[in-house]
Image (tube, grey):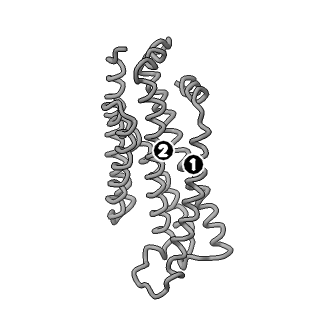
Amino acid sequence: MNKLISLEWKRNSMRSYHTGVFISGALMLGLLYLLAAIPKLDPSETDLEMFMSYRSLAGLTNIMLMVIFTILSAVMSAKFVIEEYAGKRAILLFSYPVSRQKVLSAKMCMIFLYTVTAMCLCGMAIFGIFFGTESVFQICSDTLSLATILYCSFSLVCDSLLAGVWGMIALWIGFGKQSVTVTIVAAVMISVVMCQIMAMTLNYFVGAVIFLAVGSIGAVIAWNNLKTNIANMEV
């Protein structure tokens, strides 16, 4: 499986996705500074508690990153799976001396691992720079502690895994329609709806575990269904 994933990595250009991750990180870092500065820009406003806590700022940032990387996962899935299994391109894939399911699994693993890893690294860079500058020139009125950093790390890992999971489910929906557009639209709808629900979750830790459990079940179902469709696919 590792060799197949490595082969998929080599045969597909990832430069545009690297660029997208870098741009997304830069924009989110700028937005994080803006969110942290909102209470200072308008001190008369009283309903700004959510922008005065490092945990709230990290939660908002991670949720927005999750939306971005869920869509990125859908774009990659559309390019590396749906387009390649459409029409005559599938003949080349089916000619490999490897089972169809393993080839598909390699593609899906590469997309999932790239999504999760890229979001984790992107989030680490954002929070590393932000917290580093906060230790020198503080914008947020909250106190930075080890517990807060651990909370931000846990939130980032959970939301990164969720981005990979939602992207896989969006691929399942789009593959059923053999449509790139449906895949991306499904990713947008899923991530936005989930973000709204997560934003209303009072206990993040419990909510994150529940979302991961439900999402993982959905991803496993999607994975098995896709492998069955590929095994029965005729060209």
Q: Position of residue 183 (x, y in %)?
A: 37, 39
Q: Where is residue 59 in the image (x, y as percent from the top left)?
A: 45, 63
Please state which amino acid type lies under the numbered disc 2. Leu
Image point (35%, 30%), residue name: 178
- Image height check: is 216 above or below 52? above
Q: Where is residue 219 in the image (x, y as percent from the top left)?
A: 36, 38
- Image height check: is 23 above or below 58? above
What residue is disc 1 on?
21
- Give left or right: position of 17 versus 173: right
Which residue in the rendered view is the most extreme toward the bottom?
44
Q: In which quarter of the image is residue 132?
A: bottom right
Q: How many labels does the image show?
A: 2
Q: Position of residue 91 (x, y in %)?
A: 44, 14
C-beta proximity under 8 Å, tags 1 and 2: yes
Q: Residue 73 shows which numbered tag?
A: none
Mark 1 residue crowding within 10 angstroms, few (<14) / some (14–19) / many (20+): many
Mark 1 and mark 2 lie on one chain; the one further toward the N terminus is 1
Image point (47%, 33%), residue name: 79
Image point (47%, 12%), residue name: 95
Q: Which of 10 and 200 is in front in this view?
A: 10
Considering the image in quadrants, where does the C terminus appear? top left
Mark 2 residue crowding within 10 angstroms, few (<14) / some (14–19) / many (20+): many
Q: What element carries label 2?
A: helix
What residue is disc 2 on?
72
Q: Is mark 1 on a helix, strand or loop?
A: helix
Please state which amino acid type lies under the numbered disc 1. Val
Which residue in the rendered view is the most extreme toward the right?
136
Image point (50%, 11%), residue name: 97
